[in-house]
Image (cartoon, rainbow, N blue to C red):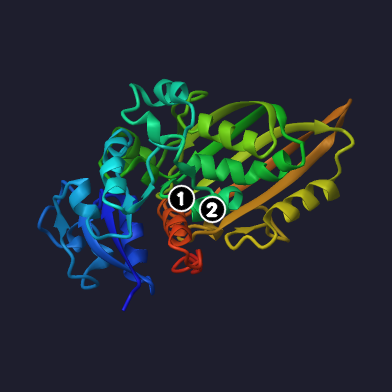
Amino acid sequence: MKRFKAAVLGGSGYGAAEMIRRLLLHPEVELVRVASIDYVGQPLADAHPHLEGISDLRFENLTPAEAAKGMDVVLLGLPHKVSAAAVPPILEAGAKAVDLSGDYRLKSVASYEAFYGGKHPHPELLADAVYGLPETNREAIRKARLVASPGCFATTIQLGLIPLAKKGLLKGAVEIVGITGSSGSGAAPQLGTHHPIRAVNLRTYKPLKHQHVPEILESLAACGAADLHLHFVPVSAPLSRGIFATSFVRVSASVSKDQVTAAFEEAYRGEPFVRMPEKRLPEVVAVSGSNYAEIGFELGPVEGSERTLACFSAIDNLIKGGAGQGIQNMNLVLGLDETLTLKDPGGFP
């Protein structure tokens, strides 16, 4: 008998497919309901063909309160703004909520309105929501009733910069280029994800105004970054999944390779899903299909009083950047081993 019961809202999307897959494998959590306004009454495999014959569950058209009834936890794979209204009835039903949207990530109402558009319908919950990056917020997540899982770009970029913030080496302007796969745009076909265009193309979108910037700033400031300014340019790549970020930081000429290596090792010692390859730099193929993140760096030559530090980070946008991190947070709020169903490596090549 499994100890906990879970429901998924927004169950027909790519992120939900990964959450459902891992919940069906979970030794301690039973997936009871999958709610969606699409595929109502149809088997899960109609939207997620890899689940053919794996489950008898069907998509149900449920209100958030109906989905949460009798549940220990509800995982939300809903779009931004939709999640904002769905969370309160889930909490009122006595379930904990793990939200994969951006609706509860920011403490600043002004930043939410500026980057997501429109007023937040439940700003009173922003103070209670815990930002769900386990590498920095693990103990707070364990005690939370509402966890706001980070965005995919935000997770990737922060993991490359957190060690510097903790050592007081992150301040001023940071330039970042992040390359992402098409699954990050969701299951609904769009011009930017249409295969004939995406497969042979590189294009930027939302340059210098991506919605993940304010959550990165808030989180890194909490880790010790000072007077930080991010200049972030996202790039769509011909990949179905994966993110690779390069962050350029100016540091003092006195900063050494050994000092940076020690900062990275100290920040992630004992972390189950962050690794620093010994003989190569991070790459997407090494983490695709898994909840692991890879980080690394290269330190440039001294230029006057400074030198450039290039930090590299790679994750699977749907797993560590989305559904897998959601499951990791679910494990934490339920008091379970956070690695349950998440330790499998991805396939290669």
Q: Where is residue 131 drawn, in percent x and y?
A: 50, 43
Q: How many numbered marks does the figure carry?
A: 2
Horizontal and vertical percent position of residue 127: 46, 35
Q: Residue shown at 25%/59% (left/top)?
A: 48
Disc 2 element: helix
Q: Which residue is mark 1?
A: 144
- Nearer to the camera, 148 or 303: 148
Q: Amino acid at mark 1?
A: Ala
Q: Label 1, label 2: how many angstroms apart (C-alpha)?
A: 31 Å
Q: Amino acid at mark 2?
A: Val
Query: Mark 1, residues whose alpha carbon is within 10 Å: few (<14), some, or many (≥20)?
Result: many
Q: Is residue 346 above or below residue 189?
A: below
Look at mark 2 in the image and give the residue it sits on.
Answer: 284
- Residue found 73% across the figure and 51% down from its top: 264
First reached walking from the N terminus: tag 1 or tag 2 = 1
Q: Farthest left residue?
A: 41
Residue 31 position, x and y percent, is 28, 65
**Element under disc 1:** loop
Q: In the rendered image, which quarter is residue 301 located in?
A: top right
Give left or right: position of 270 versus 11: right
